[in-house]
Amino acid sequence: MQSSHNMAAAGLALAASAILSFIDNFVAAVGQEAGLWQFHVFRTAFAVPIFLLIALVTRTRLRPQNFKTIAVRSLTVSAGLLIYFAALGTLPVAQAGAGLFSAPLWVAILSIILFGLKLGATRWVAVFVGFAGALMLLQPDPSTLSFLSLMPLAAGLFYGLGMMLTGIWCGRESPLVLALGVFLTIGAVSAVMLTITSIWPGETFLSQPYVPPTPRFLWLTLFQAVGAIVAVTLIAQAYRVGAPAVVAVFEYSFLIFACLWSVLLWDIQTNSLAVAGIAVILTAGCLMAFSGRNAKEISSSA
């Protein structure tokens, strides 16, 4: 019975990864129409009514069990996702995703620093192997190394911390509440930043002020919001029916799908070092997921 549940969970995780990696390829197209903060304000405005409709149909309670823990968790995860989306403005999805999917490795490190968790030899190997794989995929140039080069890794750090807080503080919260908390937090932060950039405008994806939304911007943003909600729902269901260790491994298929979509949509080829980096990250993810009893702590659920 459990094996069939795990197969279903693997299929859900694969579907979620395929959808997320597909829709994220169009963030750069959104950047041609408006800035990052305007995108997230409209994305939240589209997403919230959909969440309310889902809650109404499924009769799910949207009030958190603990508002403070949800707020901290939402801020942390939102920070990671905002950094990730900012990186998508300048990097291919596979490269930005490599940093975000370093989250399980950061969780292992933070577990030692914050909670004194002892890791076995296998997980130590996975930490360093996975970090090396992320660098192989990101391929930072030492001569031009800057904060922008390290943005994806920073995204993984905050996202990983948020996932760790999910298991520690938010185990009784429903996936819908967790997802809605992140959407609302991103929307609120983006509204503040959009106000600031509209007063002191710039010309980059991060500093662009409010502009009248074009039909293309509205359709792309609605497309992103619907796709994200579907993917989050699929991955939440995967973690409900399957073993977390199994789901966590199949989530790494995001990197493979990201490279595939980049080729099919934009003819962006992936070099051999990046392909090797994906293989290394997948290997590290398998080691992390299947070593020890605390696999759930290192899973990177959305």
Image (cartoon, rainbow, N blue to C red):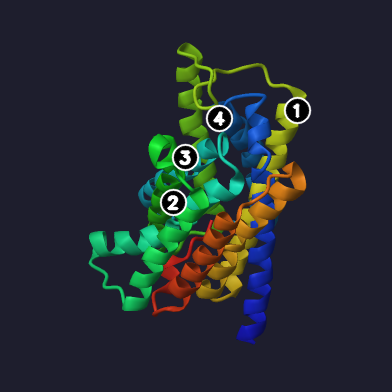
Answer above or below: position of 33 versus 153.
above
Mark sitting earlier along the chain (2/1) = 2
Q: Position of residue 40 (x, y in %)?
A: 57, 33
Q: Residues within 10 Å of mark 2 (few under 14, many from 20)?
A: many
Left or right of 174: which side holds 223?
A: right
Q: Are marks 4 and 2 in contact (CB under 8 Å)?
A: no
Left or right of 206: which side holds 11?
A: right
Q: Position of residue 201 (x, y in %)?
A: 49, 14
What is the residue that sits farthest to the bottom in this orientation?
1
Q: Nearer the viewer, residue 141 or 60?
A: 141
- Identify the image quadrant of residue 39: top right
Mark sitting earlier along the chain (3/4) = 4
Q: Which residue is mark 2?
A: 156
Mark sitting earlier along the chain (1/3) = 3
Identity of the amino acid at label 4?
A: Leu
How far apart are the two marked residues, 4 and 2, measured between alpha carbons? 19 Å
Q: Residues within 10 Å of mark 4 (few under 14, many from 20)?
A: many
Q: Which residue is mark 3?
A: 83
Left or right of 109: which side holds 173?
A: right
Q: Are marks 4 and 1 in contact (CB under 8 Å)?
A: no
Q: Nearer the viewer, residue 169 or 186?
A: 186
Q: Position of residue 79 (x, y in %)?
A: 43, 42
How far apart are the two marked residues, 3 and 4, measured between alpha carbons? 10 Å
Q: Which residue is mark 1?
A: 216
Q: Nearer the viewer, residue 193 or 97?
A: 97
How far apart are the two marked residues, 1 and 3, measured between alpha carbons? 24 Å
Q: Secondary structure at mark 3?
A: helix
Mark sitting earlier along the chain (4/2) = 4
Q: Which residue is mark 4?
A: 36
Q: Secondary structure at mark 2?
A: helix
